[in-house]
Image (cartoon, rainbow, N blue to C red):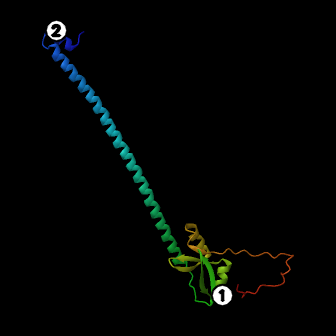
Amino acid sequence: MASLQDQLLQSGLVDKKKAKQLKQEHRKAAKGRQKGQVQIDETREQARRAQLEKAERDRELNRAQQAEAEKKAIKAQIVQLITMNRVHREQGDVAYQFKDGTKIKKLYVTPRIQQELSNGRLAIARLDDAYELLPASAAEKIAQRDAQVIVVLNQYTPTAVDEDDPYADYQIPDDLMW
């Protein structure tokens, strides 16, 4: 069976020149449609990539915001724990010195509070620019959240007396200050 173009040529409705011109236009149109299809596919791919990149940026931003909110929540918990558990400190005449970073700080406390700090029953925490006294249990809870807030938390370990110690008979006085 002959093509439609051949049939039209045989019947004389179309001449060869016109048939050739139509064939070229048909090929150009088909070629243009293929290029257009490739261009459309490329545009869709770029749009899809841009959408994926935007989604990834949004996820990263969301993670950063959640981390920031978590930091604020932990800071608020620490402030609340310190304000609820702080021990009222009477101004004493005994200077208790402790290290805060690279500086040596001094608090004047009573002898009883000094003993409790040394034994590890009390701790010192930093709240903004001030220092607060806390029970050791509250200080441990705060240290779980942020260890840098706790400045002093001594661990009490009773010393075992060595049998061969030549100074075992000599007791260290309680009021000895180094």
Q: What element carries label 1?
A: helix
Q: How far is the residue under mark 1 from the one under mark 2?
A: 124 Å
Q: Residue 167, how many percent across, how many down?
A: 84, 81
User: Marks 1 and 2: CB-CB under 8 Å?
Assistant: no
Q: Which amino acid does label 1 sit on?
A: Pro
The answer to which of 143 and 53 lies nearer the viewer is 53
Q: What element carries label 2?
A: helix
Q: Residue 74, how many percent across, how many down?
A: 50, 67
Q: In which quarter of the image is the C terminus?
A: bottom right
Q: What residue type is labelled 2?
A: Gln
Residue at the far left in the pictured view: 13
Q: Which corner quadrant of the image does residue 8 belong to?
A: top left
Residue at the far front in the pictured view: 17
In the rendered image, which residue does mark 1 sit on?
A: 111
Classify 120 as above or below 41: below
For the image shown, how many numbered marks are present on the structure? Answer: 2
Q: Which residue is drawn at 38% across and 50% down?
A: 54
The mark lying in front, picked from 1 and 2, is 2
Classify 129 as above or below 55: below
Where residue 10 is drawn, which disc sits there?
A: 2
Q: Residue 159, how many percent across, how many down?
A: 76, 76
Q: Residue at x 32, y 33 (%)?
A: 38
Q: Is residue 39 left or right of residue 16?
A: right
